[in-house]
Amino acid sequence: MLEILSAFLLALSLCADCFAVTSCSSVTLKSVDARKVLTIALSFGVIQTLLMLLGWLFGDIFVGVVEKVAHIIGFLMLLYVGGSMIIETVRGGSEARNLNGVRNVLIGGIATSLDAFAVGISLSMDRSPVNVVTLDLAAVFIVTVLSVVAGIGGGYKLGKKLGKPAEIAGGCVLILIGLNILLDFI
């Protein structure tokens, strides 16, 4: 029972940024249907889980690299997504950087999953047994998918209600999340 609670808490902590990014990014969506939401949620879940698994499998190899650059990469990706959202909204562009398109979903998914990669490395270095890591991976996938669905739903409703100010605020929040990631490194 303690292992399940631990896995659930780990998953909650890792998916918080997925929820925040999808909430902020989805304020620009013009329409939402179940298929699109499920596709985005599954993409984030797979990316988050896969990066955590890769961190665990190759932890000893990646530890030095991740410690040096993960924060910078996460910051730059969120700066790009958030900055693009703001610029496109101000310019009146038809397609702000949001969750439309594979590229934007991949950027958002990877930017929010670098911490899962680092957690996978720490599990590898702790020599966590396969059954514990499997439970952690399952919890991360499930909780990430659910948090992305909730994030998209809430962000979309907020965007419909508030329009462009919500889009600009969403871009600013993404940049602030990226800045927070970078400051944690310094």
Image (tube, helix red, strand yellow):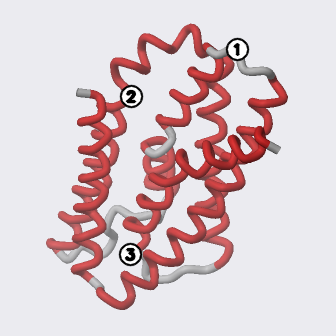
Lower position in the chain sequence, tag 3 or tag 2? 3
Amino acid residing under circle 2: Ala
Label 2: few (<14), some (14–19) or many (≥20) C-alpha neighbours in 10 Å? many
Q: Quadrant of residue 168?
A: bottom left
Residue at the spot of label 2: 70
Residue at the spot of label 3: 27
Mark 1–mark 3 distance (CA, rounded to whole Å):
41 Å
* Residue extending furthest toward the left: 91
Against 73, residue 64 (above or below) is above
Foreground label between 1 and 2: 1
Amino acid residing under circle 3: Val
Of helix, strand and loop, which one carries label 3? helix
Q: Quadrant of residue 95?
A: bottom left
Seen at 55% across and 8% down, the residue is: 61
Instruction: Kindly identify which numbered label has been placed on residue 64.
Output: none
Residue 51 horizontal/vertical position (percent): 59, 33
Q: Is residue 96 left or right of residue 18?
A: left
Mark 1–mark 2 distance (CA, rounded to whole Å):
22 Å
Residue at the spot of label 1: 127
Q: Who is closer to the viewer here, 23 or 130?
A: 130
Q: Is residue 156 left or right of residue 14?
A: left
Seen at 72% across and 38% down, the residue is: 136
Residue 155 horizontal/vertical position (percent): 43, 75
Seen at 56% across and 30% down, the residue is: 119
Of helix, strand and loop, which one carries label 2? helix
Of helix, strand and loop, which one carries label 1? loop
Q: Who is closer to the viewer here, 43 or 13?
A: 13
